């Protein structure tokens, strides 16, 4: 994707709020402490950070201010800002870097065109003529999501509340055909694009999840376990206890490296690198404070 960094409508970082959020950065190949880069635009803690596939862009979101920022990964200049109607808790770039996908903490999924500067506002619908999209559901909360390697399929982890039984919720891990999903914005039509649905009781509920290199392979975390799930067969092929095998009591974020050789998990005790092959722990990065999200630079897969 050709991306012009000299956008006339780029945001002046000096006009943003002065509240700073720490982003820790470390190199897998060496020992040593992470170093911080401070983002000074969100009005609360960063909930999710994502990098595009060629390491030229990264994005951040904050549930409190309902904003998604897109940055130049080399200069840290803000390139675009999206104002959301719903709080966004997780973001990811499509494989072609054209869209930032935002998974809302309530009942919607945003598709923001990176280089579309049409005005978006929390109080308004998405502007007519823009390429931004919002697909909305009813009566459930989205807890996580991901796109397959080529962005052909969409993973959603959602929690549905039974009417009249407010104390009981049902958790679903679902896979959708993305092109069919984008054609619909109503729950009845969206359900027609569903490829797979795995229902779980609250104690076995999926919290975070993502695709493996093969879109039939999904990795997800529950409150106590890390699980490898086969979409084609509908079977759990492997699982390990988080606290005993991964050094984390709870998973707050999951990411794959560019070539899918590392599975990264963030949690209250720091960050852990996991082998996708056997779910074994490769390395643990302890931190003095809880980590909300993890993102790999694509350069982690290169010889340089």
Image: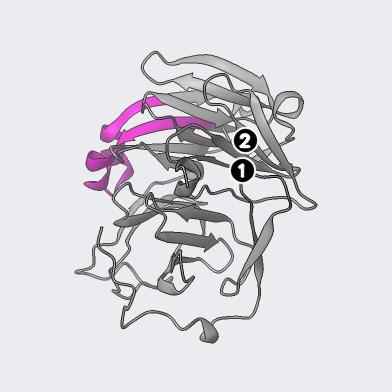
Q: Point out residue 254 in the picture as x, y percentages from the top left corner.
A: 56, 40
Q: Point out residue 199 in the picture as x, y percentages from the top left corner.
A: 49, 24
Residue 185: say if magenta: yes
What's the image's color scheme?
one colour
At x 21%, y 46%, the residue is 183
Q: Quadrant of residue 97?
A: bottom left
Specify the quadrant that holds the N terminus.
bottom left
Q: Is residue 60 above or below residue 296?
A: below
- Where is mark 2, residue-wise? 273
Q: Is residue 247 above or below residue 112?
A: above
State the CA–CA distance, disc 2 to disc 1.
9 Å
Residue 159: say if magenta: no
- The residue range painted magenta reads 171-197
Front disc: 2 or 1: 1
Tell me if 114 is positioned left or right of 219 in this view: left
Taking the view exactly as shown, the residue that stands out farthest to the front is 304
State the SS at label 2. Answer: strand
Assess whether mark 1 and mark 2 are in contact (beta carbons under 8 angstroms).
yes
State the SS at label 1. Answer: loop
- Where is mark 1, residue-wise? 28
The disc at residue 159 is none
Taking the view exactly as shown, the residue that stands out farthest to the left is 129
Taking the view exactly as shown, the residue that stands out farthest to the bottom is 15
């Amino acid at each position: 994707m050709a991306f012009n960094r000299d956008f006339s409508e780029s945001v002046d970082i000096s006009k943003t709020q002065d509240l700073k959020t720490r982003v820790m950065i470390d190199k897998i190949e060496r020992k040593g402490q992470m170093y911080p880069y401070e983002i000074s635009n969100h009005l609360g803690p960063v909930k999710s950070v994502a990098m595009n596939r060629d390491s030229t862009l990264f994005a951040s979101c904050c549930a409190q201010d309902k904003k998604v920022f897109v940055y130049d990964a080399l200069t840290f200049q803000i390139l675009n800002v999206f104002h959301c109607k719903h709080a966004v808790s997780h973001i990811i770039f499509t494989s072609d870097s054209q869209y930032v996908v935002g998974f809302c903490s309530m009942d919607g999924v945003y598709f923001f065109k990176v280089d579309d500067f049409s005005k978006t506002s929390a109080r308004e619908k998405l502007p007519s003529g823009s390429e931004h999209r919002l697909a909305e559901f009813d009566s459930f909360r989205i807890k996580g999501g991901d796109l397959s390697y080529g962005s052909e399929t969409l993973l959603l982890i959602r929690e549905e509340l039974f009417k009249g039984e407010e104390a009981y919720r049902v958790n679903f891990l679902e896979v959708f055909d993305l092109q069919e999903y984008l054609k619909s914005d109503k729950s009845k039509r969206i359900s027609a694009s569903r490829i797979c649905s795995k229902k779980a009781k609250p104690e076995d509920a999926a919290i975070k999840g993502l695709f493996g290199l093969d879109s039939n392979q999904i990795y997800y975390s529950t409150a106590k376990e890390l699980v490898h799930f086969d979409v084609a067969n509908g079977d759990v092929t492997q699982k390990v206890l988080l606290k005993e095998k991964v050094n984390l009591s709870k998973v707050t974020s999951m990411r794959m490296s560019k070539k899918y050789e590392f599975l990264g998990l963030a949690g209250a005790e720091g960050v852990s690198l996991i082998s996708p092959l056997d779910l074994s722990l490769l390395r643990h990065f302890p931190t003095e404070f809880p980590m909300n999200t993890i993102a790999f630079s694509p350069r982690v897969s290169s010889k340089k």
